[in-house]
Amino acid sequence: MTSHNLGVNAYAKTKVSTTTNQQDLIVMAYDGILKFLKMGREHLLANEFEQKYNNLCKARAIIEELASTLNMDKGGEIAKNLWNLYLHFMSRITEANIRHVVAPLDEIIPIIEDLRDGWAKMEVSKEDAEMQALNRRAAISPSSHLNFTG
């Protein structure tokens, strides 16, 4: 790994660990998914299959992490719908990875962009933001699973 990559990784880890708003973390997760999907798509078009595979696996891993954090009891219908979307995304990424086709990626990228934009525009009350900050600080651990840097 180059010193540039080490610096980028350190910056990204610091950004994740110091972000106190759950909404910001979700937007960052969607940004990571989109980054890796688009890079995977470009590698696929260039017949660079190992790089395609690695990037699509990273995108899928972030989606798996988002899916694992859904609270089905409190989230109700929204959590169920997100769960189904995440399953669909993972299925389409797997198809693109196995069959070496861009169509599944072209299908899901705009949907993920819409979800990301929706989260970014969502209004969070001051009380909710403060509670999220407290919860986030309590939950920070050095063995975080999300990796937005690649």
Image (cartoon, rainbow, N blue to C red):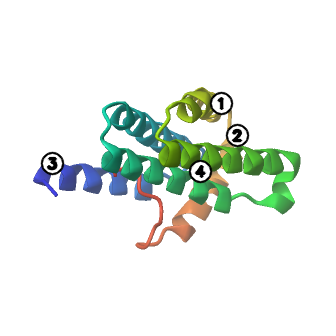
* Residue that label 1 marks: 118
Estimate the x, y position of residue 131 in percent, counting from the top left. 66, 56
Task: Tell me how far mark 3 sits from mark 4, CA to CA.
Answer: 28 Å
Estimate the x, y position of residue 35 in percent, counting from the top left. 42, 38
- Badge 4 marks a residue whose secondary structure is helix
Q: Is residue 141 above or below residue 120?
A: below
Residue sitting at the far left: 3
Q: Earlier in the sequence, mark 2 or mark 1?
A: 1
The disc label shown at residue 31, or none: none
Q: Residues within 10 Å of mark 4 (few under 14, many from 20)?
A: some
Q: Is residue 26 visible?
A: no
Q: Is residue 143 above or below residue 107?
A: below
Amino acid, disc 4: Gln
- Badge 2 marks a residue whose secondary structure is loop
Task: Tell me how far mark 1 sits from mark 4, CA to CA.
Answer: 14 Å
Q: Earlier in the sequence, mark 1 or mark 4?
A: 4
- Badge 1 marks a residue whose secondary structure is helix
Amino acid, disc 1: Gly
Task: Tell me how far mark 3 sits from mark 1, CA to CA.
Answer: 32 Å
Q: In the picture provided, is 75 more to the left or to the right than 108?
A: right
